[in-house]
Image: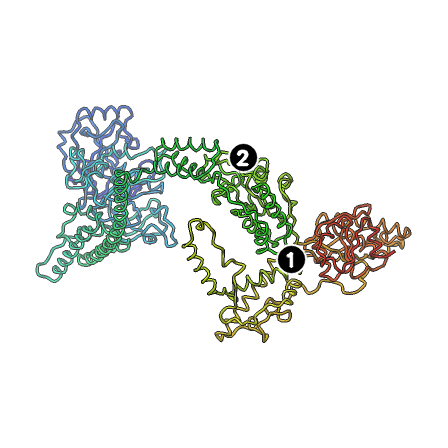
Amino acid sequence: MLRGLIHSAVSSSSAAALPRQRLLASSGGGVGSSLLTASRHPNNPSVHVSYYPIRSFFFSGKGDDGDDNNGKGGGGKKGDDDGNDAKKDDKSKKYDVDSVDDAEDRPKSSKVTKTFLGGTSSTSSSSPPDSSSSGNGARSPTKLGFGEEAPRYPHLLALPIVSKPFFPGVVSTITLTDPKTITAIENLSKEGTRYVGCFLRKDAPSGVTENGLIVDTPELITDPSELYSTGTFSQIMAINQGPGIGPEHMHAHPTRQDWDRMGGDGNGGGEADRRNGAGVGGLGQMQHHETDERFHHDDDDQPNTATVLLSTHRRIDLLSVDNVGPPIDVSVSHWDRMAYNPAAGTQTDDTIRALTNEVLSCIREVAQLNPLFRDHLRFFPNRVDSSDPFRLADFVATVSTGSPEELQAILEERDAEMRLHKALVLITKEKEVSKLQQEISAKVEEKMSEAQKKYFLNEQLKSIKKELGMEKDDKEALLQKYRKQLKEYPAIPKEANDVIESELEKLSTLEKNSTEFNVTRNYLDWLTAIPWGLVSDDTFDIDAARKVLDRDHYGMDDVKDIILQFIAVGKLKGKIQGKILCLSGPPGVGKTSIASSIADALGRKFFRFSVGGLSDVSEIKGHRRTYVGAMPGKMIQCLKNTGSMNPLILIDEIDKLGRDFRGDPASALLEVLDPNQNGSFSDHFLDVPIDMSQVLFMCTANDLSTIPGPLLDRMEIVQLSGYDVPEKIAIAEQYLIPKAMKESGLLVEKVKEEVEKVVAEEEKEAKESSADDVDKEAPEVTPEEEKEFVPGDGVPESLTIDITALESLVRWYCREAGVRNLEKHINKITRKLALQIVAEKEGTELTDKSKRKSDSWSVTEENLDDYVGKPLFTSDRMYEKDPLPNGIVMGLAWTSMGGSALYIETQAIIRGKDADGKRRGGGTLKVTGQLGDVMNESTQIAYTVARARLAEKQSEHTYFDDYDIHMHVPEGATPKDGPSAGVTMVTAMLSLALDRPVRNDLAMTGEVSLTGKVLAVGGIKEKTMAARRAGIKCIVFPAENKRDFDELPDYLKEGLDVTFASDYADVFGVAFGN
């Protein structure tokens, strides 16, 4: 029939002699081309004939001008009219290769265009009207061939695929992202050549490279070796640009719904296909106008991706890649259908039958285990012939989840037995995976069942309790809980009570699952958690309070006296009012720890929070309720946590408050720390006044200069100076050493049988006592101060830390103002002692650094370095010579370590003479030693004062005019600042100019003004301790600091010759005499 149709267009005698050449023909510009074999008609050169060695073709009606206008209709308006007339005349008649009527049945007036799947031949002939043509001139192809009936093209456009290869008889989808490939596929569909070759990629068969990168454009290759040599010959069923039929919408074997979406039916063709003569047994074809209208977009507005629906027909071998593209042009050879002819009684046939039965058995098992696999088997009778091992193996490969390489091996296998073997391996793996999946599902289902069962039982229990009146619903129970909690508070302010009642009424009307319900419930939780009217009973026993304060802290008499004053005033008034105290002092002196002792002494609850680095005002005053996760500030949280309206609140590190775009917390604290305002403190979250006037606030700070003035004005400042040597030794003996030995296990608590006996007797008496004596408190028989500790097991009785070792520790290791570093060194000693005791008991050899070197277990000054290393400070003086060299004077400075002796050095810079014999330079001052701005200004003032005093004493002296002066403060790595070294600098420069040394045991401190006045400085106690430590006998202090010196303990003042200077003349007299 095909031969006869070709003969009707081209003479067979001339067609045999047509020269064959390979041309690249395309619709609309050369992209998406197909290889054609073309020639001219020998009798009519105007007729162009192009064809393939094909086995089927279709007719396509055109307009009178014979131009298809890029597939969008021919002949302009006339073509549209013809198409409409064709619809009116005949809506069901269609010509294809299987139903070609005689030429007499065709209308005489139309022109016939024969399309040979890639080319057209226009002759003057009649053509039946195309029932499926629309006004836009779209062509409606007939059946192109399915399965073995599909054409066998030697040249194809190739599509590389990933994840898994396509198998014959299966409808699959592929998503394209390369624009050129998408355009080529569209052009193939327009031309009617709807066949491509699909080949699995070698380099990334799973779609992911070895480096874990996803292949963005799998349809692009750079080398032919990237493709496997065996693929499948597939037919384009539909093209969908953008979201459409994708892998998630498509089964391996399409369902009725899939065909409905594609416009077809489960038998491979839609109702329109059957009306137009499409075969029933094949997959059928899409109506071309559907491809154009439903899936096609204009070229000007093409999306980035396209999903192509492919129907796979047969296997093909890749012969060569003619063009790597894009698009890829390949030459292929088609496989013949491999039919299995069993030979009865042969061993091969028995093996294949056994393999087939085993495969079928595995399929049944997998179908029972895996519901998804069971869906695929619904198409098994229609798609697979169990007697055909080739198709059975292909079916197994199609529905399995094997690796791309395993599936490709089945695709390439030609032997029936080997193909079944490989399929059996795949389905066996699938069975094992399904079993594992079922086990996991059973475990999850078991857990879910238990949870559901528990939930149902709980719901039933709630319903039963509710019916019996034993339990109310959640909302009623919540309201009842709030009201019960409010009854426990003795005095709720009227304003707060009104807000609470309003919120309770609001909560009762809200739905439980609404957002407003949760917001209101959270608000009521906080309102009812505040201890309205609840206060702790204050202790008015001064003697007991003094014992508690002395139990934990040594010294600090100023703070203890203030607390005792509060207690005394409270005893007279009947209650202790709130107060704001600020403890200021160097680190490690016990500012934070004494606050807890004060709370114990007063009988109040203790709450501490640090504001160091705090920059959010909401931490103090809370968040607005409109914010997600809103909550009150620290003050309200303190009241809730302590359960009292009069706790002791410690605000730690108040001198380190931050400030940024979120506000100024220091300003927010003004309301809290003002006794005249905190009686009605308002938190942003609660938005009701809270009485904070009974709270005792304590703050700690290291530097008062960084606290804002308005905030500092609201606090009572208590200055805490550092500890001197005797105080540190006493603290170490009474507190630090016992604590360290208990923590290291060197001391353990002794269990007293007498104490246990007393406890038992008192418990017996309490039970037998009368009702009047029931409320009487039993005495504490084992308070902390009465507990007795004894050496632990194996600890020598002679183990001690001698006082000489403590003195050496304080003098040469721990010079800071506090005792924190001293505690660290004592802990280090006790840990090493514990190691030596255990090692000697077990016979373990220690290193030279850890082993005990002395015969005794006593730590003394001689063996102290064996436990804590070499001393950090070796001398208190830089210059031991008496008197000191000219231009050098010792000053006294305050540091965080409690004060130190600081030398001021000056040296003249002698310069050469110029040509006239005059000395170069003179009259300048150079300063080094990492001095701050204030100290640099102090050097300039001291230089001016020194020049003035020298002019007063010796007016003819020109030393400062002749020489430059270089002043240096040793320990250049340590930053130094402050004005207190003014008098020392003046004395050092005058010593250099007058060539007169000063005493070796003289030290001085004081700020000097431009006129020579000596001004007051701070840190008198620390400077006095530093002077005694350095062996100084004579000290010069400003006259205004006499009151500070008089307050020092007598042991610090003993043996010192102190001069109080109001003018520098007084200092000059002490340093240089009259």
Q: Nearer the viewer, residue 49 or 175?
A: 175
Looking at the image, which residue sits at the far left? 344
Q: Nearer the viewer, residue 948 or 1069?
A: 1069
Q: Which residue is mark 2?
A: 680
Depth check: 627 or 669 in front? Answer: 669
In this picture, residue 277 sits left or right of residue 1038: left
What is the number of the mark on residue 816? 1
- Distance (Cα) linking label 1 and label 2: 43 Å
At label 1, the amino acid type is: Glu
Circle 2: element type: helix
**Which numbered mark, 1 or 2, is in the foreground of this view?**
2
Q: Position of residue 732 (x, y in %)?
A: 60, 61
Query: Residue 1062: x and y, percent?
Result: 80, 48
Give the mark, 1 or 2, whose residue is nearer the N terminus: 2
Residue 280 vertical placement versus 721 (above, below): above
In percent of width and height, residue 248 lies at: 28, 43
> SS for tag 1?
loop
Disc 2 crowd rating (10 Å Cα; few below 14, some 14-19, many 20+) is some
Q: Which quadrant is the N terminus positioned in?
A: top left
